[in-house]
Amino acid sequence: MLSIHSDEHFMREAMKEAQKAFDKGEIPVGAVVVSNNQIIARAYNQTELLSDVTAHAEMLAITAAANHLGGKYLIDCTLYITLEPCVMCAGALTWSQIGSVIYAAKDVKRGYSSISGLNMHPKTIVKQGPFSEESEKLLLEFFRKLRK
Amino acid sequence: MLSIHSDEHFMREAMKEAQKAFDKGEIPVGAVVVSNNQIIARAYNQTELLSDVTAHAEMLAITAAANHLGGKYLIDCTLYITLEPCVMCAGALTWSQIGSVIYAAKDVKRGYSSISGLNMHPKTIVKQGPFSEESEKLLLEFFRKLRK
């Protein structure tokens, strides 16, 4: 039986990835990529572990999803991400021609939408989804701890 | 004896990387990262080989340079790249806080500077350097072959 999952279900899974990042001392952002109502890739931010500014959750998830599909385009996929993508990740998502991007918390400072005129691929549907408050809370907790 | 190399010298090395990409059927873009007048990372576009839209020369070079330095910031480094960086790569270079970016050919369509309001890190010096014509010629030759 195919059970059709909701945005809540998949964003909860992305939040689990963000929590893994938190537990490892990484800025807590998590992602899952969904194709045909199934998770084909999961990732969390690993910039500290890998000492690599490019290792955002989205970037790792794009690479993992392409690897899973055996092709570099993610046309029929949806990315669930706990924080609005930055410029780098929005650029990568554009190249991937991904079908949809659903993010939880808005990133007023570093989110790609803070650059007027910067859009993802014209065929990509981008929207804010559930768990915005939970994601913000986790991020705030992380930075509060960091400053102690 | 420390020999001080010129932009020409390093961009010629980036062009060698672009030629490697060309020879492997990849869009011919090459990069080197220089620190203390020495090349610490070399890379060429591998999006086809890796089946990964994130595998631009700049992204691979940033990761390799950070790996070499043992830290994720490239403050005292210069990236020589044969084509103006795209939005994704400009975003990654911003996160890296790289000292300088010198590119050969301008990318009118896909270059980050086609998005008004999109800039790299305020401390990063960005300029067009030598080998612009050679890089354009190699790219045109690649796309001409591809269309045959």
Image (cartoon, coloured by chain):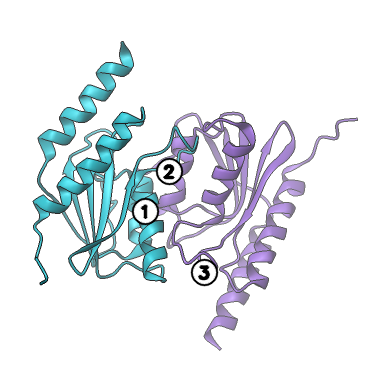
Chain colours: A purple, B cyan
Identified at 39% across, 50% down, the residue is: B60
Which marked residue is nearer to the observer: mark 2 or mark 1?
2
Distance (Cα) linking label 2 and label 1: 14 Å
Which marked residue is nearer to the observer: mark 1 or mark 3?
3
Instruction: Tell if the residue under mark 3 belongs to the same chain as the one under mark 2.
Output: no
Q: Position of residue A93 (x, y in %)?
A: 48, 41
Q: Mark 2, chain letter? A: B
Q: Position of residue A134 (x, y in %)?
A: 68, 64
Q: Would you name the residue on which mark 2 appears?
A: B55
Q: Would you name the residue on which mark 1 appears?
A: B91
Q: Amino acid at mark 3?
A: Glu
Q: Would you name the residue on which mark 3 appears?
A: A48
Viewer-proximal residue among A22 and B8:
B8
Distance (Cα) linking label 3 and label 2: 20 Å
Label 1: element kind: helix
Q: Position of residue A146 (x, y in %)?
A: 55, 81
Label 3: element kind: loop
Q: Earlier in the sequence, mark 2 or mark 1?
A: 2
Q: Amino acid at mark 2?
A: Ala
Q: Position of residue A10 (x, y in %)?
A: 73, 47
Residue contact at pointers 1 and 3, CB within 8 angstroms: no
Q: Mark 1, chain letter? A: B
Label 2: element kind: loop
| Residue B111 visible in the current orientation | no
Instruction: Left or right? Give the position of B38 relative to A135.
Output: left
Q: Mark 3, chain letter? A: A
